[in-house]
Amino acid sequence: MSTDTLPHPEKSPERPGGELIRLEGVTKRFGDNTVLDHLDFSVAAGKHVTLIGPSGSGKTTILRLLMTLIKPDEGTIVVDGQHLFPASEKQCREVRKRIGMVFQQFNLFPNMTVLRNITEAPVTVLGLTRDEAVERARELLDLVGLADKCDAHPAQLSGGQQQRVAIARALAMRPKVLLLDEVTSALDPELVAGVLDLLRDIARSTDITMLCVTHEMNFARDISDKVLMFDSGRVIEAGAPEKIFSEPEHDRTREFLSAVL
Ligand code: ADP
């Protein structure tokens, strides 16, 4: 596929090695429930890291912290050289501009056309002219195979098509980081493969940094530079996908994989 349309983020200039995301000692509690427990990990620019583990182990909470939708109780989170907590609302907005997120439930604006869904943020947040945003949106719709759906509304599309629009919408911001939160979980089974193939293409053909929560283990194996296995708010095992999937060290990892594979 043509990669001209897609972001080629430069390596983060702030840190040697191009580290783009860093969490140190991050703890998050909801009431008495410690959801993340002194968590440490980092993601280098351009790498694809997948978070796996049982439901409720804290994976989505990490993505929500990175999007500054919630705050940690303790610890440090740095994205592209910017500390997120404490940070002013303006600083958080700046960081959010560099992060694209795709959700399980698509979260498209139902009252807007497909084209408008994709052009809205580049115009209002990045300050592109409408013509520039439309040109970018059309290229992305071409890329995700929906060039003919510009004028459709989300309700007129299948779940798989809606998720492709959501991916195009995230990429239209030319983010440095793409956060993917179980993006195929809400899809009918026959629509899953097409969306995963699109994401594989994006992972292969761009420098975009990806942090991905998924239960699709074959997909995780294909795209990941590193897999983090979560249990009860901690990373219990981390490594290359060949290692995690073929020779897991931890009993919990083995149990989890035998349940989902
Ligand atoms: P995962 O993505 O691994 O399934 P989550 O990060 O969604 O896990 O959730 C981790 C835990 O945090 C779960 O026990 C969940 O019920 C709890 N949790 C998540 N968000 C909230 C919230 N807003 N209020 C209270 N508890 C929450």
Image: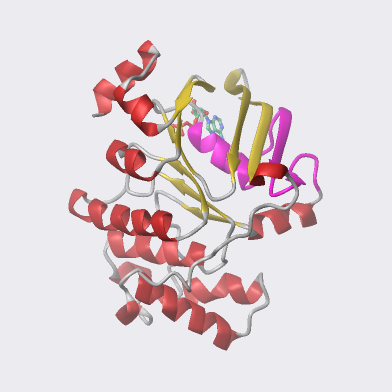
The image shows residue 84 at horizontal and vertical percentages of 74, 43
**Residue toward you, 7 or 128:** 7
**Residue toward you, 113 or 205:** 205
The image shows residue 144 at horizontal and vertical percentages of 35, 68
- Using residue 186 as the reference point, say whether residue 111 is left or right of it: right
Residue at left 40%, top 48%? 104
The image shows residue 229 at horizontal and vertical percentages of 44, 26
* Residue 153 visible in the shown view: no
Q: Is residue 10 magenta?
A: no
| Quadrant including the N terminus | bottom left
Total count of labels? 0
Highlighted magenta segment, given as a residue range: 59-87
Residue at left 31%, top 48%? 186
- Does residue 259 lie above or below 224 as drawn? above
* Residue 239 visible in the shown view: yes
Residue at left 61%, top 48%? 67
